């Protein structure tokens, strides 16, 4: 048995915080450059960036090579299960509807709500996607809504961009409030309600912006000019609901309430208002953005000549998979059921990591590995896929053939996601991620204006707002302790603002995370196009991050401090 000495990561191994942070940033910069600049395939950029993170860990940060390799392997495995498993089951569920012949009924059902695909896309990506994020998370909302957007006529690349951009606002309260809960715990707050209202209000204000960005991505200036009233109604309703519910004991259901209320108000609004130019928009949204990855594609129309009559029975059957998703995940979120599923987790010690510590001297969370086979969304989505297939009168052989076919398609996505999570693990355990955070924390009184950047970086690297909050909430709280005494807010309010801003900043890092890019690309059949998606969406991520930084900074001053609870 190999014996290793205790490793406690140093956050400034090179003697100057700026230099340690600069070296730690090498893997992140490499990922952005290879994907966005050099246009590498994600399954090449991911492993290359991991290699750089590994080298930095064992050279600059002096992590034992065996430990660095071991934590990387654990990260890779976690990337496969549960993350790739959740992606696979979400695609499986969708592809079962295609194989059964019910796919076209779903598309025609959407057009009963409105004949304008831009209106439908807001309801699907922004509202229904928010509901899926609240119940499932882990990339399932992006995979499912992107596929649904293709169903109503959007080109694949446009569908991916819309799904990723929409999957921002609900992320902080996704997975039944887990990210904001972990932000509070990691930041040293006993009551999550010290944090959740701040994150809720920051992301609620984003609701006034994101619907309009979505309309611009869907249909440019015409989309904005013709559909802005609907975007305004959806954004205001979603935002107000978030603002209210996030400050109550039901904070963990913030996105559930926001999604359901906004859909109800939106449908009622459509009884009195109708957008113009819907038919022409249907033609435009199906035109490929990039012929090199989408090819020539004929836009879809609301009806086809030989389509069967869309009666109540066919409508219900078309909606079965998504009704099942809502019911199954709602039941799984009930405390007794959630506890029962979590009780099936299998926890084992991980080799070569027993002596791995955090920078604070506590045992690392990675000294053990938890095989959460039943408590993650993948098993629930698999159940929905099987039940849906049986309801659609498919044989088990046909249902599982769909699974096998799509598993083969995901082979490159597995390599991408596994290597990116491996990178996140080795960067976190070696001290690289925290070194970056400490560098930004040196901004002093101006720090509230850049506090969301840490959440953005953390979520970009790990693919998870929950992980970003675990990584940086303690640091945010400590900085708040240092700068709060001489500020307008005081210590406790400053701590809460910075921790809440971290959770909010993470939501806009989600859309450019390599994991999310791969999920979006794979879900709608353009795997390998992550670099193209990144170049087209990263600008929106910067815009939203700048907005959050401005809000966070001004909330630390008399100008907007009144927004704090």
Image (spheres, rainbow, N blue to C red):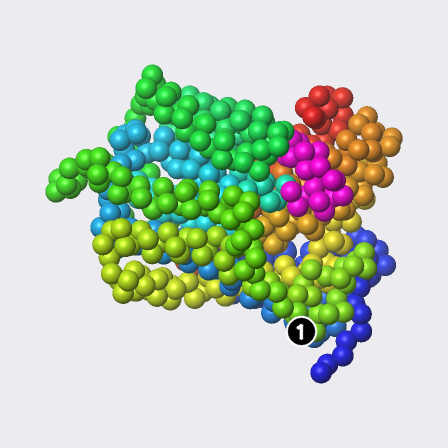
Image quadrant holding the C terminus, namely: top right
* Residue 23 location (% of width, % of height): 73, 59
Residue 8 lies left or right of residue 214; in this view the side is: right
- Looking at the image, which residue is at 82% across and 33% down? 491
Identify the main secondary structure in magenta: helix
- Looking at the image, which residue is at 45% across and 27% down? 261
Q: Residue lying farthest top?
A: 272
Badge 1: how crowded within 10 Å, few (<14), some, or many (20+)?
some
Image quadrant holding the N terminus, namely: bottom right
Question: Is 557 in the magenta?
Answer: no
Position of residue 133 relative to residue 25, above or below, is above
* Residue 523 location (% of width, % of height): 40, 53
Does the rendering let one see residue 533?
A: no
Between 108 and 227, which is closer to the camera in this rendering?
108
Between 103 and 445, which is closer to the camera in this rendering?
103
Question: Is 187 in the magenta?
Answer: yes
Circle 1: element type: loop
Which residue is denoted by mark 1 in the rendering? 351
Does the rendering let one see residue 482?
A: yes
Residue 444 lies left or right of residue 416; in this view the side is: right
* Residue 50 location (% of width, % of height): 61, 65
Between 161 and 338, which is closer to the camera in this rendering?
338
- Residue stretch rendered in magenta on the structure: 181-199
- Looking at the image, which residue is at 52% across and 43% down? 334
Position of residue 195 relative to residue 467, above or below, is above
Residue 117, quarter of picture: top left
* Residue 28 location (% of width, % of height): 63, 56
Residue 162, quarter of picture: top left
Residue 73, quarter of picture: bottom right
């Amino acid at each position: 048995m190999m014996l290793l000495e205790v490793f406690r990561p140093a956050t400034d191994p090179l003697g100057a915080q700026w230099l340690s942070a600069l070296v730690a940033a090498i893997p992140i910069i490499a990922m952005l450059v290879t994907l966005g600049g050099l246009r590498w395939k994600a399954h090449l950029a991911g492993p290359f960036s991991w290699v750089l993170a590994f080298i930095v860990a064992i050279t600059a940060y002096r992590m034992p090579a065996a430990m660095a390799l071991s934590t990387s392997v654990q990260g890779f495995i976690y990337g496969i299960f549960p993350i790739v498993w959740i992606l696979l089951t979400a695609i499986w569920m969708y592809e079962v509807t295609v194989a059964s012949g019910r796919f076209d009924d779903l598309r025609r059902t959407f057009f009963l709500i409105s004949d304008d695909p831009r209106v439908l896309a807001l309801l699907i990506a922004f509202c229904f996607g928010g509901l899926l994020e609240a119940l499932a998370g882990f990339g399932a909302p992006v995979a499912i809504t992107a596929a649904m957007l293709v169903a109503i006529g959007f080109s694949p690349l446009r569908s991916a961009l819309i799904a990723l951009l929409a999957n921002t606002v609900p992320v902080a309260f996704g997975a039944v409030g887990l990210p904001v809960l972990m932000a509070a715990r990691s930041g040293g707050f006993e009551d999550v309600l010290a944090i959740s209202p701040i994150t809720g209000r920051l992301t609620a204000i984003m609701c006034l912006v994101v619907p309009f960005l979505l309309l611009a991505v869907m249909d440019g200036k015409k989309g904005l000019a013709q559909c802005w009233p609907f975007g305004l109604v959806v954004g205001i309703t979603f935002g107000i609901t978030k603002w209210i519910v996030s400050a109550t004991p039901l904070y963990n259901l913030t996105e559930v309430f926001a999604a359901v209320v906004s859909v109800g108000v939106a449908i009622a609004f459509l009884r009195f208002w109708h957008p113009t130019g819907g038919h022409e928009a249907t033609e435009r949204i199906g035109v490929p953005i990039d012929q090199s990855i989408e090819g020539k594609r004929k836009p879809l129309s609301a009806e086809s000549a030989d389509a069967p009559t869309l009666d109540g029975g066919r409508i219900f059957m078309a909606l079965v998979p998504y009704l099942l998703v809502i019911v199954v995940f709602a039941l799984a979120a009930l405390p007794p059921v959630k506890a029962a599923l979590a009780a099936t987790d299998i926890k084992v010690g991980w080799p070569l990591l027993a002596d791995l510590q955090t920078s604070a001297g506590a045992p690392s969370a990675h000294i053990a590995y938890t095989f959460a086979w039943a408590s993650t969304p993948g098993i629930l989505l698999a159940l929905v896929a099987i039940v849906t297939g049986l309801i659609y009168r498919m044989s088990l052989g046909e249902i599982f053939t769909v699974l096998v076919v799509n598993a083969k398609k995901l082979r490159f996505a597995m390599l991408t996601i596994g290597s990116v999570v491996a990178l996140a693990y080795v960067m976190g355990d070696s001290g690289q991620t925290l070194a970056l955070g400490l560098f930004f924390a040196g901004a002093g009184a101006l720090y509230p204006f850049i506090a969301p950047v840490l959440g953005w970086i953390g979520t970009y690297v790990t693919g998870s707002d929950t992980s970003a909050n675990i990584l940086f909430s303690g640091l945010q709280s400590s900085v708040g302790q240092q700068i709060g005494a001489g500020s307008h807010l005081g210590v406790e309010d400053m701590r809460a603002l910075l921790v809440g801003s971290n959770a909010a900043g993470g939501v806009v890092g989600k859309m450019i995370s390599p994991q999310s890019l791969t999920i979006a690309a794979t879900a709608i059949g353009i795997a390998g196009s992550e670099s193209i998606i990144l170049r087209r969406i990263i600008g929106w991520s910067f815009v939203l991050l700048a907005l959050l930084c401005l809000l966070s900074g001004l909330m630390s001053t008399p100008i907007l401090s009144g927004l704090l609870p």
